[in-house]
Image (tube, rainbow, N blue to C red):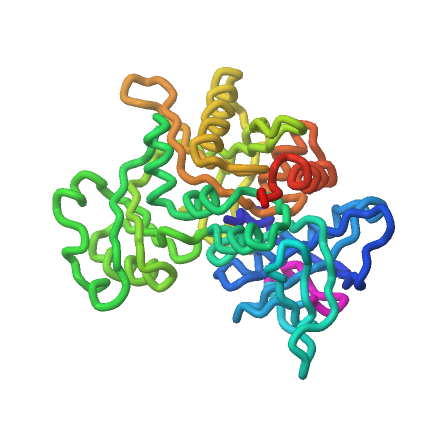
Amino acid sequence: MGDGDRRRTKGGAEHSVRVAGMSGQAGKVRVAVVFGGRSEEHAISCVSAGSVMAALDPDRYEVVPVGIARDGRWVLPEPGQQLAITDGALPEVTGGTAVSLVGDPESRGLAVLEPGAAVGALTEVDVVFPVLHGTYGEDGTVQGLLEMTGLPYVGSGVFASAASMDKEFTKKLLAAAGLPQGDHVVLRDAAGAVCADPALLDEAARARLGLPVFVKPARAGSSIGITKVTDWAQFPAAVAEAAAVDPKVIVEAAIPGREIECGVLAARGSGLPEASLPAEIRLHAGVDWYDFAAKYLDDAADFDIPADLTPEQTAAVQHAARRAYLALDCRGLARVDFFLGAGPDGEDHLVINEVNTMPGFTPISMFARMWAATGVDFAELVDRLVSGALSNGSRPAR
């Protein structure tokens, strides 16, 4: 799920995109960068993809940009497609040449869907970078499609993508691995008339969770559909807002503490997880919580990269991030979000909030900035992910 650029993008310089022809340039790896999608995080995906394409070394890679429109159409976008937030306006995939992934693993590419013809020219690709956030992209759906095509791709597989996208099952799997979770309640089939039912959460659950609580769609990101509830009278409306995004809703107790994030990246060769230096998000005075506007549109927070932690705290965060990555069977990359506070005994208390298998991916996103502070710049980060997809077992067995 995208974490965005973490500050307003000003100026909005266009990323020029080039549609590849029928045969790749000699000696270059052809990378299909897939972006947009049907989720509420469509625009954030476009921003991430623009940065990824700009970072791919043109001496080594040939880029095939593939946009997914909000209605699900796959297109090769027109050159000059805007892929930045410009003065608050969000980018969107609109027109272009219609294409479709070819299901035959031997074809390894995209078929152009020409008007009046069943299938047009084939554009072969070597590897796919699905820079997709949210449902129909980060949740295992596109990953399953890519597995069927036999194409190697960047990021986690079907299971890890689906489990990490679903907050309920993320928590279950992390708890099974002995990693600490915040108190929560899952509301199933929360859409429709039941949203107005004040008995959605019984008195025992309310007493256990306390106030405030955060009401969230179970399978969404970028703080879309989330409400901070400070009075139970607000609860039915908050559930309705979350259920408009996902019929399964999760209600989480507020967790006091510092907001800490840590990036995980597969090591070259072994694929074992390496952890970045952690970062801390510090909200400005008057900003209640880290909502969509605070993440993407407003100058609402400061970011300490690396976070001001003791060596012991840093090691504990990195260790927990690696464990979470392995517990969910992640691959390639992940961003693990924590709350760090004091427990009843005064000792550090670290709680995992979320695991993102495709975090926001621009040079000023938290994931990239944490790795830059650790010694891996943005171009190297992108290169490692593409190279790893090709060499570290991303290609499904045939």
Residue 284 locus on image (x, y percent): 49, 43
Q: In the visual, does 60 lie left or right of 363?
A: right
> Does the magenta run of residues contain 379?
no
Residue 9 locus on image (x, y percent): 65, 54
**Residue that sits furthest to the left in the current view:** 203
Residue 397 locus on image (x, y percent): 58, 42
Q: Which residues are magenta?
A: 76-88
Q: Which residue is pictured at 87% across the width and 50% down the height?
A: 26
**Residue that sits furthest to the bottom in the current view:** 116
Q: Which residue is pictured at 28% across the width and 45% down the height?
A: 212
Relative depth, front residue between 111 and 292: 111
Q: Which residue is pictured at 76% across the width and 67% down the height?
A: 79
Q: Which residue is pictured at 65% across the width and 68% down the height?
A: 99
Residue 75 vertical placement versus 338 (above, below): below
Residue 226 locus on image (x, y percent): 37, 54
Query: Can see residue 263?
Result: yes
Relative depth, front residue between 165 and 286: 165
Relative depth, front residue between 162 and 201: 162
Residue 365 vertical placement versus 136 (above, below): above
Place residue 233 in its image quadrant.
Answer: bottom left
